[in-house]
Amino acid sequence: MATNYSVSCDLFTLPLDDDHQILYAPRLGFVSTVNNDLVNLLAELGSIDAGTLNVEQQATLEFLEQKHVLNGSSEASVVTEFQAQYRPTMVTLFPTNQCNLRCKYCYASAGDSNPMTMDWFVATHAIDEVIRNVKGQGQSMVSLAFHGGGEPLFPWDFVRRAVEYAEEESEKAGLKLTVFSATNGLLSTSQLDWIMKHLASLNISFDGLPHVQDYHRPLPNGKGSFAFVDRTMKYLDAHNFNYGVRSTISSYNVDLMEESLDFIGQNYKTKMVHFEPLFYCGRCKTNNSLSPDMEKFLLNFKKCDLKAKRYGVAFMYSGCRIESLTSTFCGATRDNFSVTPDGFITTCYEVTTRDDPKSEIMFIGKMKDDGSLEIDEGKRKFLHSMSVNNLEYCRDCFAKWHCGGECIAKLGHTDYFGPRGHDRCQLNRKLVLSRLVNLVKGEYYHPMMTSTTQPEKETL
Ligand code: SF4
Ligand code: SF4
C-alpha cells in the first residue's frame, strides 16, 4: 500500500445522477461509475494521511493505483509528432468542381463555378509522390481517395484512368493499393460494377428519407434524386459491397433524425451511418433558414444513439468519437495531402478553391509542372501546432481527446488558437458525455469499441 496518493493522469469527474458520478481517464481507457464519497476523497488526496483511511477506502485507492489512475501513469501518447519533411502516403484527389446535383447546402456551390477538371499530369504526379513515399518509408500500403469540391466521380473517364494508373504503378512498386471515394451516389450499374472491382468502399452522401433527399439534394432540373441513390445502394447491397452513409441534418430534417436512421437501417445494409449538422458555407450562405437547432440535433442524436445496436451500425457525428483518441479534429492539421483540380495542395476537404479565404492557411502548396511538390513549410508547421494539447481553450475539457479541438474550418473566426465557443463545441461536449453515460450503463454500441474502453463492472 502506498503512503501517499496522487492523480497521475488526465482525470475527469462527470455528472451521472444524484448519488453517482463518472470517473474518466480517457488516455488510460479507464471509465467507472463512482459514488460521491470517492469523488470527495480524490479531491482531498493531496492532504490525506494514508494511515487514516478505512479498509474500503484503501482498497479503492489501491485499485485506482493498479489501474495507473493514481501514482504513476501509462497514459497513451496521442499527440502526432511533427515530421520534418512532408512525405504523405495517402493522396486525395478532387477531380472536378462540377456536380450533377444542386444540393441546397453545397459547401462548394458545385456547378455554379467555371468548370474545371484536374489535369492528368497533376493526378499522375500526385500518385507517383505517394508511391515514392511509401517505398521510401519501407511500408507496403498506399491509398488513393477521391473527394471534392464537386462530385468526385463525375469526370468518370478521368477517375477510371487515375485508378488504373495507380493500380499499375503500385503493382510495379510491389505495393498494395486501396482506393476509396466519396460520392453523391448518382451512378449507373456499369459504373457500380467497375467500382466494386476496383474500390474498397464508397462513402455515399444520402439524406435518408425520400422526401428529405429530394428536397435537400435535387437534380439540376429540380427533380428529386432519391430514386437514383436508392437504386445505387440496393445494387451495392445485392453485391455485399461496403459503403457508408453520410447525412446532412438541417432545420428541415432535424426532427426526422430517428425516422431517417430507421429508414436507412431497415432498407440498406450499410454498417456506417454518419449524421452531421449543416454548417453555413457555399450555396447555403444565401439560405440560413436551413441551419438546424443544435439542441434538437442533440436530443435526436441521443435517441438515434440508442438504436445503433438494433441496426448493427457504427453511428457517428464527427465531434464525439469516444471509440478513438486523437489530438486533432481531422487530418487538416496532420499533413493531409489533397489536391484540387488546379493542382493546389490543401489539407482541408472543404477548402477547395483559391478564392476561399481559408485557403490562406489550408493551401499549403502546389504541384509543380515537373511533378515535385512546392510546400510552404511555415504553413505546415502552423497547422500542425494547432493540436488540442496546444489550445488553451480546450485545456481542461474532458472531451478533448475525442474532439481534438474542433474543425478549424468552422471556427467562424481566424484566431486559430482562440476560442471554440460556438455551438458545435457545446454539442461535442454534450454528446461525448451522453455517450460516456451510455457506456457505463451498458447502453453504448459501436462495432469498433475495444475492450480497453469498457467500463469497470463495479461502482467504486
Ligand atoms: S478542417 Fe473541418 S472541413 Fe476541413 S477537413 Fe477538417 S473537418 Fe473537414
Ligand atoms: S473545448 Fe470544445 S472544441 Fe475544445 S476539445 Fe472540448 S469540445 Fe472540443
Image: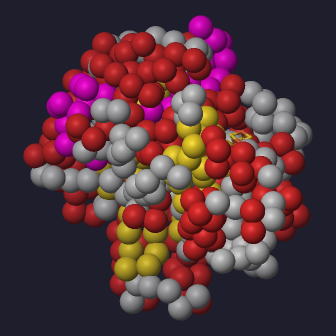
Q: Where is residue 29 in the image (x, y as percent from the top left)?
A: 54, 62
**Residue in view at x 70 percent, y 61 percent:** 53
In the displayed structure, does residue 84 sit left or right of residue 187?
A: right
* Relative height, residue 34 to residue 5 (above, below): above
Magenta-drawn segment: 261-289
Residue nearest the observer in this picture, 212 or 14: 14
* Relative height, residue 185 to residue 203 (above, below): above
Residue 351 seen in render: no
Residue 63 seen in render: yes
In the displayed structure, does residue 418 sit left or right of residue 181?
A: right
Q: Where is residue 271 in the image (x, y as percent from the top left)?
A: 28, 47
Location of residue 445 (image quadrant): top left
In the displayed structure, does residue 224 sit left or right of residue 56?
A: left
Q: Is residue 32 magenta?
A: no
Q: Does the magenta stretch include residue 280?
A: yes
**Residue in view at x 84 percent, y 32 percent:** 413
